[in-house]
Amino acid sequence: AEISNGAKIFEANCASCHIGGGNILISQKTLKKEALSKYLENYNSDSIEAIIHQVQNGKNAMPAFKSKLTSEEILEVAAYVFQNAEQGW
Ligand code: HEM
């Protein structure tokens, strides 16, 4: 199957900490639907926007990506994370 741009961006920038939708640093703060709903601010009102905000700005031990990825790339990786959260990684 063709590998999406979002998947490639995730592999290159996120998988080191979030392999398989997990979190190697803070184990409960995964990219799974239940964790995002519980821990990520505004996820329940605007999921993609909430992921974009986290990726742009980072949080605590997670680095900011706004100077590393373009806004198009951040949108693509956020959509990829949302899709996988909905599908169950
Ligand atoms: C949290 C996405 C890269 C470390 C999160 C959350 C999202 C996310 C959506 C919220 C999870 C939740 O609250 O349940 C991404 C994406 C990345 C990326 C899309 C790539 C563009 C990384 C990298 C690291 C990292 C490279 C490690 C160096 C963390 C940590 C948290 C977190 C420690 C918890 C932050 C806190 O609330 O204290 N990430 N992440 N992330 N991420 Fe990332």
Image (cartoon, grey):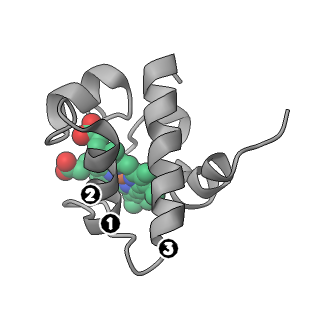
- Quick one: 50 or 16, which is closer to the camera? 50
Q: Quadrant of residue 29?
A: top left
Q: Residue at x 50, y 73 (%)?
A: 70
Q: Ligand 1 closer than 8 Å to the CB at disc 2?
A: no
Question: What separation in Å lies between label 1 and label 3 (alpha carbons)?
Answer: 10 Å
- Amino acid type indicated by mark 3: Thr
Q: Residue at x 49, y 72 (%)?
A: 69
Question: What separation in Å lies between label 3 and label 2 (alpha carbons)?
Answer: 13 Å
- Quick one: 2 or 13, which is closer to the camera? 2
Q: Residues within 10 Å of mark 3 (few under 14, many from 20)?
A: few
Q: Ligand 1 closer than 8 Å to the CB at disc 1?
A: no
Q: Ligand 1 closer than 8 Å to the CB at disc 3?
A: no
Give the quadrant of the N terminus.
top right
Q: Residues within 10 Å of mark 2 (few under 14, many from 20)?
A: many
- Amino acid type indicated by mark 1: Gln
Task: Check residue 45 in the rendering and tell me which mark sits there, or answer none.
Answer: none
Give the residue at mark 2.
53
Q: Quadrant of residue 38?
A: top left
- Amino acid type indicated by mark 2: His
Q: Position of residue 37 (x, y in %)?
A: 21, 27
Give the residue at mark 3.
70
Q: Position of residue 76 (x, y in %)?
A: 53, 52
Tell me, yes or no, if residue 2 can be seen here.
Answer: yes
Give the residue at mark 1.
56
Q: Residue at x 26, y 57 (%)?
A: 53
Does dot 1 land on a helix, a strand or a loop? helix
Question: What separation in Å lies between label 1 and label 2 (alpha carbons)?
Answer: 5 Å
Q: Are marks 1 and 2 in contact (CB under 8 Å)?
A: yes
Does dot 2 land on a helix, a strand or a loop? helix
Q: Is residue 62 left or right of residue 44?
A: right
